[in-house]
Amino acid sequence: MLPRPATRSDRIAVNESLLRELIPAVTGVLVRRGADFATAEDAVQDALLKALATWPADPPDDPKGWLITAAWRKFLDATRAESSRLARENRLAAEPAPGPSDSSDTLQLYFLCAHPSLTPSSAVALTLRAVGGLTTRQIAEAYLVPEATMAQRISRAKRTVSAVKLDETGDVATVLRVLYLVFNEGYSGELDLAQEAIRLTRQVRALTPDEEVSGLLALMLLHHARRSARTTADGALVPLAEQDRSQWDTGMIAEGVTILQDALARDRLGEFQAQAAIAALHADARTVEETDWVQIVEWYDELDGLTDNPVIRLNRAVAVGEADGAQAGLAALEQVDREVPRHRAAEAYLRERAGDLEGAARLYADAARAASNLAERDHLTRQAARLNGLLRS
C-alpha cells in the first residue's frame, strides 16, 4: 500500500518539530558571528514565525541554512541603524554561506542558558525559550503564571547572561540539573515539560559523550515509563507498590536500561547513573514482591557516597526497611534529620509495617499537613484515615 499524501496539517506538524530541533544551533551560529544573545534569540524567534508561515507551502531544501539566513537578516534589520553594527555586517560578507554548523555551538548555547549566574527558575525558563523553542505563552501556562510575568523573567535572564561569551567553558552538570528541573515540573495544559526535558536531554546526549548525560536520559525514561500508572483517573496518587505494572511502557523501560548499561560499562559512575540503576531495579520487578531491595540498598549506598544528600539517606532508610525489616529501616531513619521533607511520611510507613498503627496514623496526619502539593496531601490523609478506621474496628 502506498503511503497517503501528506496533508497541509501534516507538513505543518513536521515543520514545527524540525524547527524546535534546529533552534539552539541557529541561535548559536548567530551568537558565534557576534550577535549579542538577547538580540540573536529575538531574531531567531522572528525567523521561526516566518518559517511557520511559509514552509507549509514552500518548504526549503536546507531548513537550517534557511533559518540561519532568515534569522541573520532579522538581526541585521534590527541593528542596521546602529553604526557600531556596520563592522559586523562587513564581517558577514567574509563568512562562508550558511550551512551545517559545528555542534559545539548548540552545546555552548545550553551552557549559556544554564549559566550559574541565573536562578534555577530563570535558567529553566530561558532554556525552554531559547533552546526548546517554546513560546513565552506556553512556558507561562506550564508554570501557571501570567504571560507578562514569564516574559519579564525571561528578559531578566537574557540581560543577566548578556555579557557571557559563548566560547566560555560550560559545565555539563549545571545543564543536567536544569534539564532535571524541567523534567520534574511534569506537565500542565498543552505543554508536557517531562517530554520536553527528554527531548532536550536526547539532544545534549548527541553532543557530548558524558556518561551522566546518558544516566539522566535513562533516569527520565525509566520514570516516565511509569507515568500512566502513577495516578488514578481523578488524579489521586498511586504508590509504586500498588501500581498496575501492565500500564508501564515496556519499550521506554527497555530503552532506558540499554542507555544505562552503556553508561555504566564506561565505569565512570555519577549521581544520575546511580539513580537510574535504582529506577531500573524497580522497573525490572514483575511484582512488588520480586523487587531486589538488597541491591537497591547497595545503589543507595553508592548514591549517598556521591551526593551526601539527606533525601537520599531518607529513601535509603525506606529501602533498608524493605530489605531487612521495618525496625532496621527505622534505625536507619534515625540517622536522618527530621526536618528533611517527607521524613514523617517515611516514618509513618515504616511504623505501620512494624505494627505501630497508632503512631503511624498520627505521623501520616502530620505529614499530610506538611505536604507540598494537593495530591500528596490527599494521599497521606487517606492513609491516616485508613489506619484510624482499623484502630476503631
Image (spheres, grey):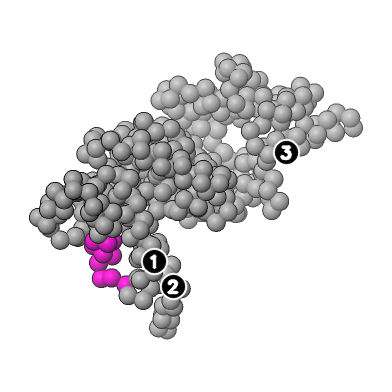
Q: Above or below — where is 368 with respect to 100?
A: above
Residue situated in front as seen by the camera: 177 or 325: 177
Horizontally, residue 67 falls left or right of residue 270, namely: left
Residue situated in front as seen by the camera: 362 or 244: 362
State how far apart marks 3 and 1 are (Cα): 44 Å
Which label sits in the foreground, 3 or 2? Answer: 2
Res. 356 image quadrant: top right
Which element is circle 1 on?
Answer: helix
Q: Residue at x 19, y 60 (%)?
A: 98
Which label sits in the foreground, 3 or 1? Answer: 1
State how far apart marks 1 and 2 are (Cα): 13 Å
Give the numbered dot on residue 52.
Answer: 1
N-terminal-most mark, 3 or 2: 2
N-terminal-most mark, 1 or 2: 2
Which element is circle 2 on?
Answer: helix
| Predominant SS along the magenta part | helix
Q: Which residue is mark 3?
A: 378
Quadrant, the C terminus: top right
Q: Which residues are magenta?
A: 59-71
Q: Is label 3 in contact with label 2 (beta carbons under 8 Å)?
A: no
Which label sits in the foreground, 1 or 2? Answer: 1
| Residue 119: x %, y % from top left | 43, 32
Q: Residue at x 58, y 17 (%)?
A: 337
Horizontally, residue 305 falls left or right of residue 163, namely: right
